[in-house]
Amino acid sequence: MTYQRLLLGLFVLLIPRDLCAQDFSRATCGSNGNYTSNSAYSANLDTALSSLSTNIDNDGFYNASTGQGPDRVNAVALCRGDVQLYTCRECVQNGVSRLGDSCPVQKQAVFWDEFCTLRYSNATVYGAVATSPGYYLWNVNNVTSPAQFKEDLRTLLDDLRRRAAGGSSTRKVAAGNVTGPDFQTIFGLVQCTPDLSSGDCTSCLIGAISEIPQCCDGKQGGRVLRPSCNLRFEIAPFFNETRLQELEFVPPSPPLIEPPPQSPPSGKKNGSTTIVIIVVVVAVCLIVAVSAIIFLKKRKKQKQKPTEIPQTVDDISTAESLQYSFSTIKAATNDFSDHNRLGQGGFGTVYKGKLPNGQEIAVKRLSRDSGQGDMEFKNEVLLLAKLQHRNLVRLLGFSLEGMEKLLVYEYVQNASLDNFIFDSVRHSDLDWDRRYKIIGGIARGILYLHEDSRLRIIHRDLKASNILLDREMSPKIADFGMARLFGQDQTQGNTSRVVGTYGYMPPEYIIHGQFSIKSDVYSFGVLVLEIISGRKNNGFRSRGDSVGDLLSYAWESWQEGRGGEVVDPFLRSGSGSMNEMLRCIHIGLLCVQEDAADRPTMASVVLMLSSFSITLNVPTEPAFYAASGSGYGSDASLIHNSDSTTSNHKSSSRPSQQSRRSLQNDASITDLHPR
């Protein structure tokens, strides 16, 4: 194996330079102000940059901050995951020198090289995702089968993105290869700065991947470089595979194996061995006894009533660390008074509360028909509490007493989305920029649940009332994992117990009980159309009552080139981009197609929302499509005219479907933006 790796290393050295993008270095200066040569900022900058190369270690990442107030300098250095320490330090030293020459007075700059990235600023850089400025490189040679190459490359990069953002390695780097067309092997590497959260790393890499068509479409290799993340692909190996495997693989602890006894040479030796065995046994018994005492004391402490909430995922180690006494929650909600009641859902009632330390919470009092035992419930809560993303409502803890099961969440200030978009007055609080950000945030939150969290979660009840808005009007998805908490059979791909809200559920779920990540995609599509139109899917009526649901109305309007009529009149009169609104309608219609296989994944949806250079497919008609003037409206009411959340559906007959009509408008919206 060592011999093979040596040969591979020699092969990489012998690769002609035109097969891989050439070695490069580039410095880009920022535009957020200048400093003078003898200023405090200049001195702090010299101190911060000089510390990078000496302090960076085998992790290949180091951040430094020097000074106070407006003279504070923040700097980070990141080396490519597969380079050795001496190469890393040499690259960083070169970068510091290059930045000094290229950006002598700028307060912000970025340097890229083959093996490292440097960045400094007077603004915060640690833990803050930065996607611009950006830089591209590409191989001048073209591939022979561009369409297949693009598909295989996308598969590879999506896999690497998931590994880098959510893998066991703290380096947030992943590399690998896949067999492409014409027996070519495509090699790829993606990397984020380790200070980013899993969600920020995912978002940064999705954006970088979406830029490939702008720089490197049909090329044999290319790079997209951002301050917080980067990617590279080639048809020849360019990374140290052995080094990267060491980073991603954490070897298990060796098992404790007792050596086989050896025959003693004499009876005296036998006596000594017996004494040693007795001493060891006594010592082990003492250790076990002391450990048991410590465990019991610790368990007793954990059962005391908590009033503080774990602040980090690392604090959440046992279910008991999340448990509140029922009396504490009862007092916090004023005995679950109607005055504290926030809302009612299919899984229970939500109350506002305040803990003794003053922290505001939201408490969900679950219905009593959960199929789980107490231990199962605790384990599920422990798993869900570890799922943290900026677009998910944070689960803080729980309470169990008899038949009472309570979930304790962070309190989100601005209530739910439906209180805004469907309200004749408050809908004006959400202009297009805010609605567009809400759509993107919801998409990223669902993507985290589907692909980037510790366990795959299918929400199964996405709707406007389950999207909460914080002080900045950023969306937070609530009630994720509710189906898991209501019985293990609810996590399988087929169920006899349908949980969700009519109007948001896809046909395969309502009729056959089949659900998947594409079920959430369908619900997301309905939600997008509601956000854009400001109208509910359930009970929708168009002008003249010719179409009885929002999906059919949006489909017919889009197909006939009247997509703008779907948009909320308040948005049409504002300054928002009509192209963005029409593109979102297009994406929404892709998500609500009848065949689940035709619907995009949430990763694709996030990509469509973040990059206008991607051409969208032409959607087919939505599920339960009712043509204007058809006799299908009465059947459709079975699906759409109920706004209640259901936990049981017994219908097994499928409503008759209109035959699919040929598309009159097969053009898709493409709006190119310069990098």
Image (cartoon, rainbow, N blue to C red):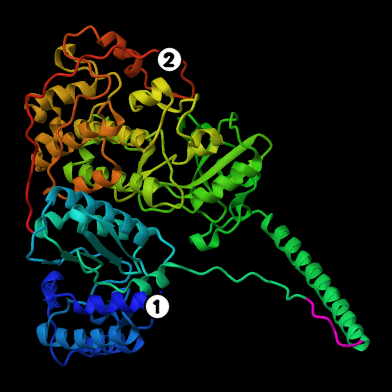
Badge number at residue 574: none
Residue placed furthest toward the top: 631
Return the residue at label 1: 2
Q: Main secondary structure of the magenta part?
A: loop
Q: Dot 2: few (<14), some (14–19), or many (≥20) neighbours within 10 Å?
A: few
* Residue type marked 2: Ser
Q: Dot 1: few (<14), some (14–19), or many (≥20) neighbours within 10 Å?
A: few
Query: What residue is drawn where x is 18% and y is 38%?
Result: 584
368 relative position to 675: left or right: right
- Residue 462 within the magenta-colored segment of the rendering: no
Return the residue at label 2: 652
Query: What residue is drawn where x is 11% and y is 49%?
Result: 613
Query: Residue 486 placed where, x, y %?
Result: 54, 34
Query: Residue 381 placed where, x, y %?
Result: 55, 46
The quarter of the image holding the C terminus is bottom left
Q: Earlier in the sequence, mark 1 or mark 2?
A: 1
Residue range corresponding to the magenta coloring? 261-266
At mark 2, the secondary structure is loop
* Residue type marked 1: Thr
